[in-house]
Every structure is written in structure tokens, then in C-alpha cells.
Image (spheres, rainbow, N blue to C red):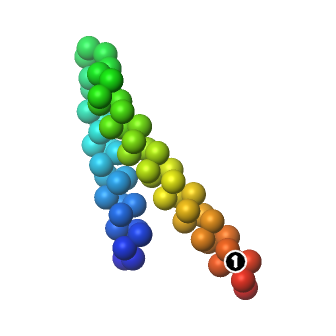
Amino acid sequence: MSSDNRVLAVLLRRAQWLLGDLAFQVGRSGIDGVETEDVAAVLDEISSLLREKRSLAHAAEDRR
């Protein structure tokens, strides 16, 4: 597994954990601003990495 894939895998697992906790709290008592900021930051980072990987894949295809 490449370093980029490891980073993405770790971020996806972290997002899974944070989203699970957030879903539980929303159902129980609402949302805390700090926790939503943590979730948003991880999702932003995942989104950025996925876009970067897509761009690299398209660039590799264009070189073929």
C-alpha cells in the first residue's frame, strides 16, 4: 500500500469513528460546535485527497 493510500485509509477510518460519535450525539442531545469542526476538518482533508488522487489518475491516463 502506498503512503498516500495509507494516509487516506487512516483518514477514512477516523471519519467513520467521528461520524459514528456525531450521529449518536445528534440523536441524543444535539451537536457541539467543536466536534462538528473536527468532523468537517477530516471530511475536508479526505475530499482534498480524493480530488488529488482523481487528478493524478486522469493525468496518468492522458499520458497513455
Q: Amino acid at mark 1?
A: Glu
Left or right for 45, reference 55: left
22 or 33, which lies in front? 33
- Identify which residue is drawn at 31% across, 58% down: 10
Q: Position of residue 5 (x, y in %)?
A: 40, 68
Q: Residue furthest bottom?
A: 64
Q: Would residue 10 be visible to someone looking at this image? A: yes
Q: Position of residue 22 (x, y in %)?
A: 31, 29
Q: Position of residue 51 (x, y in %)?
A: 57, 57
Q: Residue furthest top?
A: 29
- Identify which residue is drawn at 26% across, 14% down: 29
Quarter of the image with the C terminus in it: bottom right
Query: Could you tell me which secondary element the residue under label 1 belongs to?
Result: helix
- Identify which residue is drawn at 37% across, 73% down: 3
The answer to whether 8 is drawn above or below residue 35 in the figure is: below
Left or right for 28, reference 60: left
- Identify which residue is drawn at 46% across, 45% down: 44
Q: Position of residue 55 (x, y in %)?
A: 63, 65
Q: Would residue 27 be visible to someone looking at this image? A: no
The answer to whether 44 is drawn above or below residue 35 in the figure is: below
The answer to whether 50 is drawn above or below residue 60 in the figure is: above
Check disc 1 and report the residue beneath it: 61
